Image (cartoon, rainbow, N blue to C red):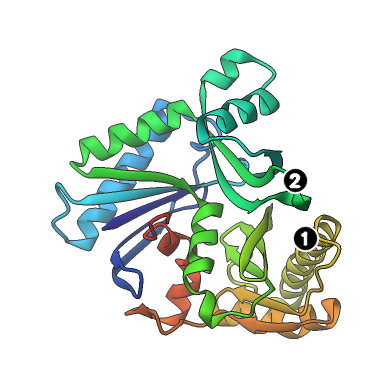
Amino acid sequence: MYVLHLSGDTVKILEGACTRRKLVINSLYSVAMPCDYLDAPDDKGYEKIEAVVTNGLRDLGEEFKNKKIRVVLDNINIPFKEMVVPTLDRKKTIALVKNEIFSDEKLADSNTVDYLELEKKVDGQKQTRIMVTYVDNAILQDIQKLCKNLMFKLVSIDVGQNCTAKHLHYIAPSLPESYVFAELRDTVVTVSLVIGGAFRYCISKSVVLLDAMRFKSERTYFVNDIGNVLRSAIEIFRKEYPDFECKNVIIAASPEKFELLRKPVQEKLGVAVDALTVPDNVDSIAPEDYSEFFCTIGGLIRED
C-alpha cells in the first residue's frame, strides 16, 4: 500500500503494509514543496503537485502502476472541529453538521463533510461527541484525477489530524493512558489530547520554520514558540475537560529539536517530557524518520 501525504510544505510518499498486529515501512520519500494549493486549489497548483509526485515515485524506483494508494491532506486550514450532536445515523449526522457549519447552501454543496466519533452518551444523554472535518470538492476531484493519471487505485482520502489519531490508537499499548502529544511538522505543530486511551482533541498551530538555528537567539525563539503553543493547547484542553491533569507530554521531533525543547518545556509546564520512540509493533524505520513520517504512517491504518 502506498500513502501520499500532501501539505503546504512537503510531499511525502511511503510504501508499507499494516495488519492488526504490525506496521511495516518499506520505503520513504520526502521533498520540500511550498505550495498554497490546499488553501486555494487551481490548475497551476495541481500541475505542480502532479510533477513533484511523479518525480518522487520515479526516485523511489518502484513499480507502482495499478497499486493501491491512500491520500492524506494536511493543512492547518482544513478544519478538525469538535461538536456534540444528537445521536443519529451517519447520513442524518452529516446533514445536521452541514446545516450547523455552512450558512450558504452553495458552499455546503461544494464541500464534503466527514467526522470521527469520539464519545457516545455524552453526559449520559443521547448525544455523541464528534470531530468534524470538511474538504473542498475541487481538491477531492483533483486527487482522483491525479491517481487516475498515475494509474493508482485510490482507496481513501483522509486528513492529517485523523491519521495522527489513528496512529496514536494503533500504538496505544506503548504510550501512557492519558497524555498530550506534540507533533512538529515543518511549519506546523499539531497538539493532540488522549484521555484514558481515547483521542479527545486536536489543535494545529503555525510556527516559524528555523532549519539551521545556528544562533542562540534563533534557538531561544524556537523553544519559546513551541512552548507557548503547548501551553495554550493544554489550557484549551483543560477548559474542555476540567478533570484532565496533564502529567505527560510526548514530542515527535528530530533528536536535535527534542533536546532543545525537553528541559525548557518540562520547566515551563511542570510535566514529564519524553521523545516519541518506535514501538514494537512498527518495523523497519529509524527513530528520526518515525517522528517525521508519523502522520503519513497513520495513513496506512484502516478505520475499524
Q: Is residue 294 left or right of residue 201?
A: left
Count of labels in the image: 2
| Residue at left offset 56%, top offset 53% | 161
Q: Looking at numbered disc 1 in the image, what kind of residue is underneath it? A: Ala
Mark 1 closeness class: few <14, some 14–19, many ≥20 residues within 10 Å: many
123 or 222: nearer the viewer: 123
The Cα–Cα distance between marks 2 and 1, rounded to whole angstroms, is 27 Å
Q: Is residue 78 visible?
A: no
Q: Position of residue 136 (x, y in %)?
A: 51, 29
Q: Position of residue 219 (x, y in %)?
A: 72, 74
Q: Quadrant of residue 140?
A: top left
Q: Looking at numbered disc 2 in the image, what kind of residue is underneath it? A: Gln
Give the residue pinned by disc 2. Answer: 125
Q: In the displayed structure, would residue 89 be above or below residue 202?
A: above
Q: Is residue 198 visible?
A: yes
Q: In the displayed structure, would residue 122 be above or below residue 224?
A: above
Q: Which mark is residue 98?
A: none
9 or 121: nearer the viewer: 121
Q: Is residue 153 left or right of residue 161?
A: left
Q: Which mark is residue 233?
A: 1
Quarter of the image with the N terminus in it: bottom left
Q: Quadrant of residue 45?
A: top left
- Residue mark closest to the camera, 2 vs 1: 2
